[in-house]
Image: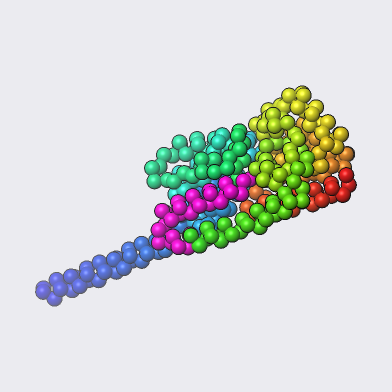
């Protein structure tokens, strides 16, 4: 009888010990494979978050189609589910991605960190939400993302700090390229179809002749006044501008007409987008556009 009781006790102890090992293994596995879940409203913010977080983060970018108009985006059930599970959410703000505000409101979470680019940016232009085109703004936003990562995963703070330093260094070629363009083309008159590129034409010293009211109307999806449209057209037909920079994601019959007029008057065109193209990083996206602009200005200076 005593042997039977002893045997049962031994069996129970073994079962309990094995259960403890299994549970501990699962817990260890869960912790080792855990990543910080990040949802970015726009893919350029998602790309930057991935560069800063490395293999410690899992990033979902909602707006990622460079051929679609971001202003016409409507969120989905999948987007809502992703936001509800996110540790960190990055949005632009300033009226640019109001749909993200609705997703956040639909799944309240006191532990979720929400970073709003427009609130973080330190060099904002009036009535211009395209703050990610400002290199200084992006550097400041990257620092805020890094701080959020360090709070979410303090054990890897050193890694995040190192990644931020690498990212900051990678912005230097962009600044150098913009300085090069300013040195050679400061004061050159150019045209814009909308406000997005003002964050770079300003630091480069380019003289934007297009009426600001025209640019803002196109950016906001409104029709510019007849006078502003006539002015923008005259600047092309009279060759008052050397280059036309147009946003390929905010296209209207008016901007298409300007594009066609520029072509027929041999005025170089430079395409910019609001959403980062596929298979690009923020840095290569910006550099490609700057290279295209530099080439267009070079061609224009030769032909005029």
Residue drawn at the location 51% of the way across and 55% of the way down: 58
Residue 178 position (above or below residue 191)? below
Q: Report the quarter where the C terminus lies.
A: top right
On screen, residue 291 versus residue 150, left or right, reads right
Q: Position of residue 106 (x, y in %)?
A: 45, 36
Residue drawn at the location 11% of the way across and 74% of the way down: 2
On screen, residue 244 versus residue 95, left or right, reads right
On screen, residue 48 versus residue 87, left or right, reads right
Residue drawn at the location 67% of the way across and 55% of the way down: 176
The extreme left residue here reads 2
Q: Position of residue 6 (x, y in %)?
A: 15, 73
Q: Report the quarter where the N terminus lies.
A: bottom left
Q: Is residue 153 a member of the stretch shown in magenta?
A: yes
Main secondary structure type of the part rendered in magenta: helix
Q: Is residue 115 a member of the stretch shown in magenta?
A: no
Quarter occupied by residue 15? bottom left
The extreme top residue here reads 226
Who is closer to the viewer here, 222 or 227? Answer: 227
The extreme bottom residue here reads 3
Q: How is the image coloured?
A: rainbow
Residue range corresponding to the magenta coloring: 133-160
Who is closer to the viewer here, 258 or 251? Answer: 258
Is residue 149 in view from this perspective? Answer: yes
């Amino acid at each position: 009888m005593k042997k039977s009781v002893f045997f049962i006790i031994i069996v129970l102890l073994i079962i309990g010990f094995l259960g403890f090992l299994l549970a501990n293994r699962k817990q260890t596995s869960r912790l080792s494979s855990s990543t910080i879940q990040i949802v970015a409203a726009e893919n350029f913010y998602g790309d930057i978050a991935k560069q800063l977080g490395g293999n410690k983060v899992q990033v979902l970018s909602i707006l990622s189609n460079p051929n679609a108009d971001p202003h016409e985006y409507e969120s989905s059930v999948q987007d809502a589910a992703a936001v509800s599970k996110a540790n960190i959410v990055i949005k632009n703000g300033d009226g640019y991605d109001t749909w993200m505000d609705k997703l956040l409101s639909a799944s309240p979470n006191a532990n979720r960190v929400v970073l709003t680019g427009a609130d973080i940016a330190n060099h904002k232009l009036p009535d211009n939400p395209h703050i990610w085109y400002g290199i200084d703004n992006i550097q400041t936003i990257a620092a805020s993302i890094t701080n959020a990562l360090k709070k979410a995963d303090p054990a890897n703070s050193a890694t995040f700090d190192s990644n931020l330093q690498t990212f900051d260094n990678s912005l230097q070629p962009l600044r150098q390229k913009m300085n090069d363009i300013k040195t050679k083309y400061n004061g050159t008159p150019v045209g814009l179809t909308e406000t997005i590129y003002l964050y770079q034409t300003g630091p480069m010293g380019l003289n934007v002749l297009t009426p600001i009211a025209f640019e803002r109307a196109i950016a906001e999806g409104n029709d510019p006044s007849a006078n502003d449209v006539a002015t923008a057209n005259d600047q092309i037909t009279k060759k008052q501008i050397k280059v036309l920079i147009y946003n390929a994601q905010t296209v209207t019959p008016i901007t298409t007409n300007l594009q066609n007029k520029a072509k027929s008057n041999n005025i170089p065109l430079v395409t910019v987008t609001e959403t980062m193209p596929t298979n690009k990083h923020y840095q290569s996206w910006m550099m490609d556009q700057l290279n295209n602009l530099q080439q267009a200005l070079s061609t224009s200076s030769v032909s005029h």
